[in-house]
Each structure stands twice: as structure tokens, then as C-alpha cells.
Image (cartoon, rainbow, N blue to C red):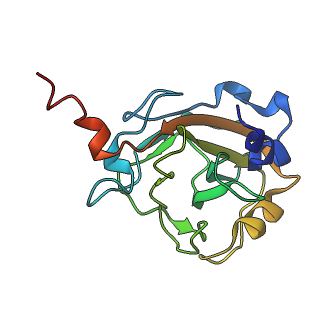
């Protein structure tokens, strides 16, 4: 883990006993926890979209689910926010590949969409941490809210957390073909 992991939303909002509470879990059909993202979910491929996600039933008392996806390895004081989603029903569910969620806030580029991972070419693999918060109140935020607004709204209201991490490093095309000319 990098030093940036301490700045993730989950570090600020959730105590250890809330992780996986009541069997609450987050998965993706596109990658296993800790595995690399396929380029089809990154800025390195045209028509890239958000990966599919599915989760088990959250703990009792959950009124809404909130998804925050952050890159703790990005430069800056805060992790780069790649996706900010709320309004997800408090039950077992899923977001299909490329599906538009009910409510989306501003990502690090101030757009209300999945921010395609695009770490610098010379960086080691970055982590993309998918944090799904079960909260005990319905959020009244308007679409387009900021990370700070969403985190402030759920602070003190998290009743469970499920997490999933993907990694991604960009490979220069020259590096991919470095041995093509070898005899």
C-alpha cells in the first residue's frame, strides 16, 4: 500500500469492524481483487467504459449505497476520484459494464462520469480502490456533487463497507514490441 491509501474515503469514514459486515462484499466479473484492469476500462482504449460491479446484500439498517472509486497513487493532497455514485438501492445489486448509475458526482476532472484510468507512462501500477459504503440515510445531494460534499453527507452514517481493488500501469507501445526486431 502507498502512503496515499491513508487518504482514501474509507480511511476517513469507516472503522475496521465495518469492513465486510454481515458478509457485505463487492466483486467484478472483469477482474479479481488486486488484479490488473483490462485496457477496455481505461484511457488506453477507445470506447472504454466503467467495469461491471456486483455486491451482496448490505448490513441491516442500510438505506442507500454509495460508491467511491479513488486512485491513492495519484499526485496531489487527495486521492484522484474516478467515480462518485449514490442512489444505489440498499440490497444485493449490480452495475453492468458501462451502465449509467442513478446519481453521479464530480470526478477529479470535474466531470460526472467514470474517469478513465490514465496513470503516467513512467509510473508503477496505480491502485484503483472501489469503496462501496452502506449508509443509514438516503442522500439528498443533487447529481454533480463533489467528493467533499458526498463524504461530508455520509460521515457518521456508514454501517458497512465492501472494497475491491484493481491496478493499472500504462505500457508504451515501444515497450510492447521491444523484441520484435530481435534475430
Indicate the quadrant containing the N terminus: top left, top right, bottom left or bottom right: top right
- 105 sits to left or right of 157: left
- Residue farthest to the left? 183
Which residue reaches farthest front?
183
Q: What residue do we see at 41% from left, 32% from top?
A: 31
Q: How many marks?
A: 0
142, above or below 99, in the image: below
Is residue 175 or residue 90 the one in the foreground? 175
Q: Residue at point 54% right, 44% down? A: 123
Determine whether 102 is above or below 171 in the image. below
Task: Tell me the quarter of the image containing the C terminus.
Answer: top left
Q: Position of residue 135 (x, y in %)?
A: 75, 50
Residue 14 image offset from top left, x and y in percent: 82, 41
Identify whether 126 is placed above or below 141: above
Looking at the picture, how far across and down is residue 148, in whole percent? 77, 67
Given the current orientation, which residue lies at the most extreme top position? Answer: 183
**Residue, x 85% and y 56% (percent of image)?**
155
**Whether residue 23 is visible:** yes
**Which picture quadrant has residue 173?**
top left
Q: Is residue 61 visible?
A: no
Residue sitting at x 42%, y 63% = 100
Residue 182's x, y, as percent? 15, 25
Q: Is residue 158 left or right of residue 172?
A: right
Between 71 and 60, the one lying in front of the other is 71
- Nearest the viewer among 79 and 161 is 79
Amino acid at each position: 500500500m502507498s502512503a496515499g491509501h491513508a487518504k482514501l474515503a474509507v480511511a476517513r469514514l469507516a472503522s475496521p469492524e465495518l469492513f465486510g459486515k454481515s458478509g457485505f462484499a463487492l466483486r467484478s466479473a472483469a477482474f479479481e481483487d488486486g488484479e490488473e484492469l483490462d485496457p477496455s476500462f481505461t484511457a488506453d482504449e477507445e470506447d472504454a467504459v466503467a467495469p461491471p460491479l456486483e455486491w451482496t446484500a448490505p448490513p441491516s439498517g442500510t438505506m442507500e449505497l454509495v460508491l467511491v472509486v479513488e486512485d491513492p497513487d495519484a499526485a496531489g493532497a487527495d486521492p484522484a476520484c474516478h467515480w462518485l455514485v449514490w442512489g444505489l438501492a440498499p440490497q444485493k445489486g449490480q452495475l453492468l459494464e458501462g451502465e449509467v448509475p442513478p446519481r453521479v458526482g464530480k470526478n477529479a476532472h470535474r466531470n460526472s462520469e467514470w474517469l478513465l484510468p490514465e496513470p503516467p507512462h513512467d509510473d508503477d501500477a496505480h491502485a484503483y480502490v472501489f469503496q462501496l459504503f452502506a449508509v443509514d440515510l438516503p442522500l439528498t445531494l443533487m447529481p454533480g456533487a463533489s467528493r467533499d460534499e458526498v463524504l461530508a453527507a455520509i460521515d457518521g452514517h456508514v454501517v458497512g463497507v465492501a472494497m475491491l481493488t484493481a491496478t493499472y500501469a500504462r505500457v508504451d507501445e515501444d515497450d510492447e514490441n521491444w523484441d520484435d526486431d530481435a534475430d
